Amino acid sequence: MRLLNYLIYLSLFVACGPTPEWRAGVPVRIEIDPGIPIPSETARQAVTDRLGQFGIPVGEAGTRTIQIGYDPVCGPPKVGAVVVAHTDGKIWLCPAIVDTIKKSARGPYLVVSHEVGHVLGLVGHLPAGQGNLMAPILDDYLGLAGFSGADLRAICSSGNVDSPTC
């Protein structure tokens, strides 16, 4: 009887627990507003590369969509992009995204890459100055090529990603 109760409890816990929204092997579509102030291919490549770190492919027949648009009044003056709620799959580029080019030609790519981490479920930021793409300031991740190990662990711990990376 105890075993039966345990199995019922376990099945309820698993059934009611968080369901990952993003899964390795399940394609995601990328929709980019043609009015964004950076090259569309830069934005597309940033999303493709960051999803690739979790084994999530990009394709036209995707079950989920990440949208990238432009909001001329979003965020504080120095913010290049925002994700308002990680569950909606939208990245809003702000006017300051253009200023990131002054710091590095890769600035827009890195900012969009950072925002993908929020779309995948990371609500906050990781410590600055430690090589994390999910640090709050572009200067702290200018030399990075992708998510750090700490970034990957933090995104995985959100419970929104089902991937062998996690």
Image (spheres, rainbow, N blue to C red):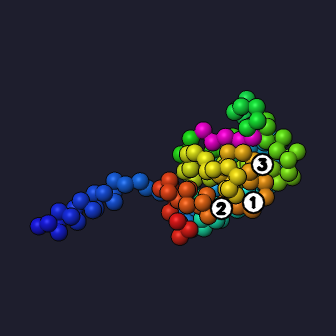
Q: How far apart are marks 3 and 1 (CA)?
A: 10 Å
What range is drawn magenta here? 80-84
Label 1 sits on residue: 144
Q: How far apart are marks 2 and 3 (CA)?
A: 15 Å
Of residues 55 and 31, the one nearer the viewer is 55
Decide: marks 2, 1 in contact (CB < 8 A)?
yes
The single residue placed furthest to the left in the displayed view is 1
Label 2 sits on residue: 148
Residue 162 appearing in the image: yes
Q: Which amino acid does label 3 sit on?
A: Asp
Q: What residue type is labelled 2?
A: Ser
Residue 28 appearing in the image: no
**Residue 160, numbered circle:** none
Of residues 28 and 8, the one nearer the viewer is 8
- Residue at x-position 85% and y-position 51%: 104
Q: In this view, does 15 lie above or below 4?
A: above
Q: Which numbered disc, 2 or 3, marks the residue that appears first in the sequence?
A: 3
- Residue at x-position 79% and y-position 41%: 97
- Residue at x-position 41% and y-position 53%: 18
Please state the horizontal and vertical placement of residue 57, each as a whole percent of the image: 63, 65
